[in-house]
Image: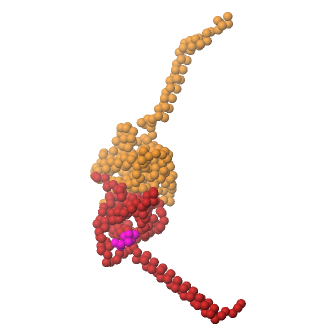
Chain colours: A red, B orange
């Protein structure tokens, strides 16, 4: 093997040093991006900026006693981003059900993990201008949900009707639990169906 | 010569036959029986007589490892639905119904097995029985499926998952019949009724007129008089009112008048227990 000239040695060492600097900076950038993503995920849905103005919203509140759903007017600050708006709205609805005197008591803790909005297209692939909300529920909330046809159906109808009132572009809702499809909410209401937000077939109780 | 000695066969035989009244009587009797028998077969094949079996399927929901809801008093839904189904079956069989139960014991049937059993029975009514601690009174549910388009082609194939769509109009009529029976209870016997629609298995796969009946505490608003769905009083009152509504359903379906009035909720003593 021939001995390298001075210039060749300088070139080799500077290339090695350069690659080390590049590796270090790549590692640093990757860590910074991860931190930023994690921060964004933490801040993403829960709280709206305090300086955002409070908006009027309609919450469709279920009542177990008579199987009805009644609109309740409220005001709340909503994030600008649409996924975050839906999630904040549903969290507000579920807060109502967590109150001690709730007409439809649900005490399973945080209900909504994540909401995805998908454009609905027709058979030819053209956008219909409407969206499907995919609501990913927390497994803990679902496991603690009371069991019964009426009580489970009311939860789903209340969510669908509240979305319809406040985001009319959402025409369909689909429910996942911890990211997976589940057969039923708590043994009854079928979660494999897509629920339509309009024309929900709720009949008031028979008059006596 | 031989031919003249022989008796003239046909006329002679016929004469002999008709000359014997006993043989003639026997043959006529056999022919009459054969005619009656064949006409009876034709009759039963073409249209059922009014007294033909009126089949009701009762599906006590849950069972086995699937306990269903846990009631406030510790009872499990699967036991309550079976007790209610047994009581209702007795009342219906006493009144001439043919009752088919999807389960008679603590068996864990799949939704597909339940639907297959019910659909094979060609029942005129299917009741899916549930119990819960949430809400109050009786919750009646029909399927959320939209009615099947009767004019659509290829109606010979019915998708299993949505078979109920073809019977939804009759199912809603059956729910109205049950609602009317419970609404006729007044005073201390009054039981509030809630009507709704939902996606529920195996109801969506049933081809019969189908209603899910969920029994909640009958008097949930009064903590001193709250009766869980498994209380003997609740099971008895609900079973009797359901049996009456099915008697009415049979009467309206077949056109036969309702002769037995013993379960009529309008006759319930307003001051006390039925
Ligand atoms: Zn049940």
From the viewer's perspective, is residue B179 above or below residue B18? below
Residue furthest out toward the top: B1
Q: Quadrant of the N terminus of chain A?
A: bottom right
Image coordinates of residue A157 in percent, x first then y, are: 37, 60
Question: Residue at left 46%, top 53%?
Answer: B202
> Which stretch did the figure color magenta?
A78-85
Name the foreground residue: A18 vs A176: A18
Report if residue A82 lies within the magenta region: yes
| Whether residue B88 is visible | no
Image coordinates of residue A46 in percent, x first then y, are: 38, 74
Image coordinates of residue B238 in percent, x first then y, are: 37, 51
The answer to which image quadrant residue A88 occupies is bottom left
The answer to which image quadrant residue A72 occupies is bottom left
Question: Residue at left 35%, top 48%?
Answer: B176
**B191 relative to B200 in the view: left or right:** left
| Whether residue B10 is visible | yes
């Amino acid at each position: 093997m021939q001995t390298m000239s001075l210039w060749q040695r300088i070139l080799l060492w500077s290339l090695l040093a350069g690659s080390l600097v590049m590796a270090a900076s790549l590692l640093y950038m990757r860590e910074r991006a991860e931190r930023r993503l994690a921060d964004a995920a933490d801040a993403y849905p829960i709280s709206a900026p305090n300086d955002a103005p409070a908006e009027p919203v309609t919450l469709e509140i279920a009542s177990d006693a008579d199987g009805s759903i009644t609109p309740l007017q409220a005001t709340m600050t909503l994030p600008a981003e649409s996924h975050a708006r839906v999630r904040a709205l549903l969290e507000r609805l579920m807060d109502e059900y967590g109150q001690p005197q709730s007409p439809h008591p649900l005490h399973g803790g945080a209900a909504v993990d994540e909401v995805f909005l998908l454009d609905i297209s027709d058979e030819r692939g053209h956008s219909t201008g409407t969206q499907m909300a995919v609501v990913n529920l927390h497994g803990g909330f679902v496991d603690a949900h009371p069991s019964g046809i009426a009580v489970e159906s009311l939860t789903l109808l209340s969510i669908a009707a509240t979305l319809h009132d406040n985001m009319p572009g959402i025409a369909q809702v689909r429910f996942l639990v911890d990211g997976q499809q589940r057969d039923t909410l708590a043994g009854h209401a079928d979660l494999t169906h897509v629920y339509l937000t309009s024309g929900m077939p709720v009949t008031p109780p028979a008059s006596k | 010569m031989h031919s003249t000695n022989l008796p003239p066969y046909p006329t002679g035989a016929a004469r002999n036959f008709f000359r014997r009244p006993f043989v003639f009587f026997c043959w006529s009797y056999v022919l009459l029986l054969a005619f009656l028998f064949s006409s009876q077969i034709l009759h039963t094949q073409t249209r059922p007589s009014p007294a033909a079996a009126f089949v009701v399927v009762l599906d006590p929901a849950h069972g086995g490892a699937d306990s269903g809801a846990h009631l406030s008093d510790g009872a499990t839904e699967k036991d309550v639905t079976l007790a209610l189904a047994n009581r209702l079956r007795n009342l219906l069989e006493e009144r001439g119904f043919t009752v088919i139960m999807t389960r008679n014991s603590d068996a864990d049937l799949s939704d597909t097995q339940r639907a297959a059993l019910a659909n094979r029975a060609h029942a005129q009514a299917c009741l899916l029985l549930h119990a819960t601690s949430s809400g109050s009174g009786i919750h009646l549910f029909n399927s959320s499926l939209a009615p099947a388009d009767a004019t659509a082609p290829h109606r010979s194939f019915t998708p299993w998952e949505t078979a109920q769509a073809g019977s939804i109009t009759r199912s809603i009529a059956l729910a109205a019949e049950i609602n009317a029976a419970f609404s006729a209870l007044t005073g201390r016997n009054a039981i509030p009724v809630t009507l709704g629609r939902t996606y529920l298995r195996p109801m969506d796969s049933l081809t019969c007129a189908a209603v899910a009946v969920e029994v909640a505490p009958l008097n949930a608003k009064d903590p001193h008089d709250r009766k869980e769905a498994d209380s003997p009083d609740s099971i008895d009152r609900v079973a009797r009112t359901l049996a009456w509504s099915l008697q009415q359903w049979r009467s309206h379906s077949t056109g036969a008048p309702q002769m037995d009035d013993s379960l009529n909720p309008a006759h319930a003593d307003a001051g006390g227990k039925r």
